[in-house]
Image (cartoon, helix red, strand yellow):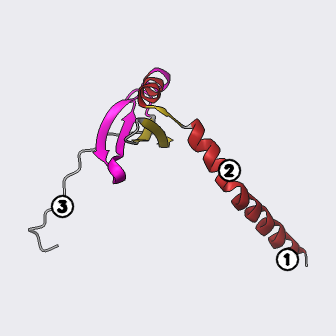
Amino acid sequence: MKEFFAHSTVLAAALGLFAIAPTVATAQSQRNCGPREVVVDRLADGFGETRQSIGLGANNAVVEVFASDETGTWTITVTMPNGITCLVASGQSFERLAELLPDTDSDA
């Protein structure tokens, strides 16, 4: 019976978090977005991050990776055509790689 109660409590907590997730996501997206110039300046001033790569995503969104060689921090942003930039992900231990594609001529 205790095991059933424990599983029920965990399930109820998970459902509660799931129910408020849209509100949390909306609040985070509003807090983590802004005019591109402001976001880029904040990444540079606050974390020493500069743009490392850029690509074009769906709906003409610009996807960029910013990182700092000194601190190892990195941030991925998406800028929409209206000029609003949102933080998508961030983390530590950034490393620059230059990997080659595997040799397709070998039998291995």
Of all residues, the one furthest to the top in this rendering is 45
The residue carrying mark 3 is: 102
Residue 42 at what x, y percent from top left?
48, 25
Q: Nearer the viewer, residue 84 or 107?
A: 84
Q: Residue at x 83, y 67 (%)?
A: 9
Specify the amino acid type for callout 2: Thr
Q: Quadrant of the C terminus?
A: bottom left
Q: Quadrant of residue 52?
A: top left
Q: CA distance from mark 2 to mark 1?
A: 30 Å
* SS label for mark 2: helix
Q: Quadrant of residue 64?
A: top left
> Where 72 sits versus 80, above or below?
above
Q: Are marks 2 and 1 in contact (CB under 8 Å)?
A: no
Q: Residue at x 64, y 43 (%)?
A: 27
Range of residues picked out in magenta: 45-72
Q: CA distance from mark 3 to mark 2?
A: 45 Å
The residue carrying mark 1 is: 4
The residue carrying mark 2 is: 23
Q: Residue at x 42, y 28 (%)?
A: 40
Q: Which label sits in the foreground, 2 or 1?
A: 2
Residue 78 at what x, y percent from top left?
41, 43
Q: CA distance from mark 1 to mark 3?
A: 52 Å
- The first of marks 1 and 3 along the sequence is 1
Residue count near mark 1 (Cα–Cα under 10 Å), binned few <14, some 14–19, many ≥20 = few
Residue 50 at what x, y percent from top left?
36, 28
Q: Which label sits in the foreground, 3 or 2?
A: 2
